[in-house]
Amino acid sequence: MSMFPFKAHFLRRLQQCRHTCWCTPSPAKGFCSRLILGIETSCDDTGAAVLDGKGAILGESLHSQKEVHLRAGGIIPTVAQHLHRENIERVVQQALERSGVEPSQLNAVATTVKPGLALSLGVGLEFSQRFVRQYNKPFIPIHHMEAHALTVRMLHPIAFPFLVLLISGGHSLLAVARGIDDFLLLGYTLDEAPGDMLDKVARRLSLIKHPQCFTLSGGQAIELLAKDGDRLKFSFRTPMGQTHDCCFSFAGLRNQVTMTIMKQEAEEGIEEGTLLPCVNDIAAATQHTVATHLAKRTHRAILFCKANGLLPSSSPTLVLSGGVASNHYIRKALNIIAETTGLCLLCPPAKFCTDNGVMIAWNGVERLREGKGILPPHVDVCYEPKAPLGVDITAEVRAAAIRVPSVRMKIAN
Ligand code: KG4
Ligand code: ZN
């Protein structure tokens, strides 16, 4: 049984109505002097940060569970929950101490409540609801993917609308961001997310046994090894070549890679669980195919947006974020597409692409500014492990069946 009663309908109604008393800035106090605490526990990072109303980071703290999950060979939800419980109080306290802000001085608390691992989301939500009740503060429930999409606005003065490609361990989506809570969903992954796929390939390659990789996430390990690899030694088919939409698929590619690994093991007389001599080449070919797949779908999304006037004609922007967006090879691939189509590519630094408390606090700042989704402390909120982002127009994108011209993907490592 879940820790919280499920009252999604009630929550949605509450989020729709504006609680004037909780969201109108007092005339004496400008937005800049507002102080927001952000809390993130949707997956395997316990993060907290305090931001002011302009987005200045006053204090932050992050506890990563990566090493534990790497050793276990994947995220075990009960272990993640236990670690969040063990660390959340200290992480929040540390962020507050570093900022020099007392809980009583905060104007609101923003916390990820969807989507994510139920057991992980529950810890952050339970902690936050206790906290806002204790200090009588407004509560802002946050959509994790909305936060990834908006982080860029903390760093660059970029106006809506813009196109965003979010790629992480749990997600892969293309959307037009038209406002802080207004997204058009152009494509999403039909099976696995790219980060998840890279993590699984890294595990199958036993990269944890590689002296350079044992502390790295699967995606980071693949990127590092690919630098010394020859991608042309192996050739993988780019997924969904015959489907002219903007959705993604990574499970079939993982299968291709696994088959190749098995073939190499058989040829070289190496047992599963032992490092192959050709790991660098496999990593390079895998990374290249992931980058090409992401680039092709994004290219189609840009053409769809242009055909339908969804982006401004002057300085249209493509934003790339999420953990996998830290990958420089993938960034370069997307930059080729942006340059080909006349878009400007913006990508937050790696530290803000992966999960953290800052992005959640920033989403709180954006919502507080617009007075959207701010709840009084006593309102019961429920987490939602599955929560799509925005209005799904993938059917319209598929119906348009846009052919993408071929682009030469010559990417230096
Ligand atoms: O956004 P994130 O921190 O958490 C989720 O919301 O999933 O993303 C984590 C994912 C992991 O799957 C990890 O392997 C991947 O991002 N990742 C990378 C890189 N750094 C992290 N993938 C490719 N290249 C990287 N440099
Ligand atoms: Zn994330």
Image: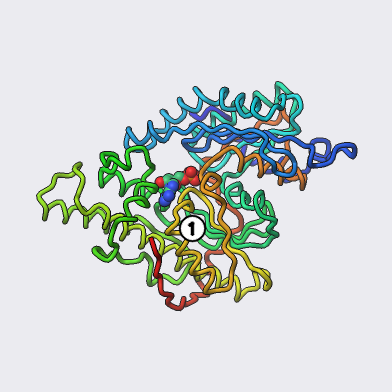
- Tell me if residue 325 comes above or below residue 380 in the rendering: below
Residue 128 coordinates in the image, percent (x, y): 63, 28
Residue 56 coordinates in the image, percent (x, y): 69, 41
Q: Residue 363 falls in which quadrant of the image?
A: top right
Q: Which residue is at a point 53% across and 44% down the rendered structure image?
A: 351
Q: Which residue is at a point 61% across and 40% down the rendered structure image?
A: 358
Give the left or right position of residue 389, taking residue 264 as reference: right
147 or 376, nearer to the observer:
147
227 or 365, nearer to the observer:
227
Residue 1 coordinates in the image, percent (x, y): 48, 28
Q: Residue 60 falls in which quadrant of the image?
A: top right
- Tell me if residue 276 comes above or below residue 412 in the rendering: above
The amino acid type, in three-letter code, at marker 1 is: Tyr
Report which residue position mark 1 lands on: 188
Is there any visible trace of residue 150 in the rendered image?
A: yes
Secondary element under disc 1, as helix, strand or loop, is strand
Disc 1 residue lies near ligand 1 with CB under 8 A: no
Q: Which residue is at a point 80% across and 42% down the rendered structure image?
A: 31
Is there any visible trace of residue 169 in the rendered image?
A: no
